[in-house]
Amino acid sequence: VFKENDIKPTLADQKIYMCFDKQHKLQLLVSAHMDDFKATGQMETLKWLHSILCKHFGQDVKMDIAKEFIHTGIKHTIIDDGNTIMLDHIDYAASIKPINTAQLQKLKHDQALDETYQACYLTLLGAVAWLLQTRLDIVVYVSALQRHSHHTTSLHLKRLNRLVRHIQRHPQRLVHRSLPLPVALIAIGDSAY
């Protein structure tokens, strides 16, 4: 339905769509996750998007324009100044349960996990990795734990549990403030990598 209306996917992510006007100015940005959409643009453009979705999917299509909402576990809050958006996973993070069993505590640190604990490790690690969208402070720890996803020991699982508890004890919010235009983005690569 998007492509039919000149709302095209980006090259970087096929679930993020953009629409430009005839002067190549961005009018609409939409992310899709299953049957949920998150969109940003001027009100007129958002109403146009809603009409397209209603025409295709029926009049039951809900579109809420809110200052606060949760999409894919990320809470979005538009601050009253209209130029600041706050994102957090605080509620999502609170719902993550560490894997604590008496049997795990008895395992030696270098003991490989059995199939059940290995599956639990991967599930818990995936849940924590989802937080990286708003928790840049844990990237290095998640990356280190991901390196051991094929040969996991009880020590890795205990460290993952410790990371979950840290995340829950120290909630974080990511604040985005709009920048005055024009904005330039410059990347300088390290030639050693």
Image (tube, rainbow, N blue to C red):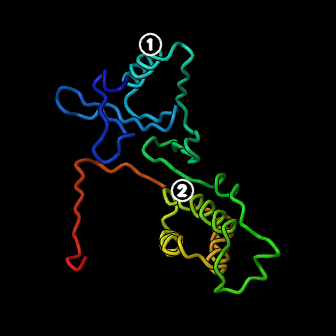
- Left or right relative to 181: residue 101: right
Tell me if residue 63 comes above or below residue 59 in the rendering: below
Q: Which residue is mark 1?
A: 55
Q: Residue at x 71, y 86 (%)?
A: 108
Mark 1, secondary structure of its residue? helix
Q: Which residue is mark 2?
A: 130
Cα–Cα span, label 1 and label 2: 33 Å
Q: Amino acid at mark 2?
A: Trp
In this view of the protein, which residue sits in the foreground, 31 or 122?
A: 122
Mark 2, secondary structure of its residue? helix
Q: Residue at x 50, y 60 (%)?
A: 132
In this view of the protein, which residue sits in the foreground, 88 or 56?
A: 56
- Tell me residue 78's x, y (percent): 51, 42
Quarter occupied by residue 5 = top left
Q: Residue at x 64, y 57 (%)?
A: 93
Assess disc 1: are there few (<14), some (14-19) or many (≥20) residues with their C-alpha within 10 Å of its C-alpha: few
- Tell me residue 15's x, y (percent): 39, 40
Mark 1 or 2, nearer chain start: 1
Assess disc 2: are there few (<14), some (14-19) or many (≥20) residues with their C-alpha within 10 Å of its C-alpha: some
In this view of the protein, which residue sits in the foreground, 131 or 107?
A: 107
Q: Residue furthest left?
A: 23
Tell me if residue 85 comes above or below residue 51 in the rendering: below
Q: Residue furthest front?
A: 115
Where, quadrant-wise, is the C terminus in this rendering? bottom left
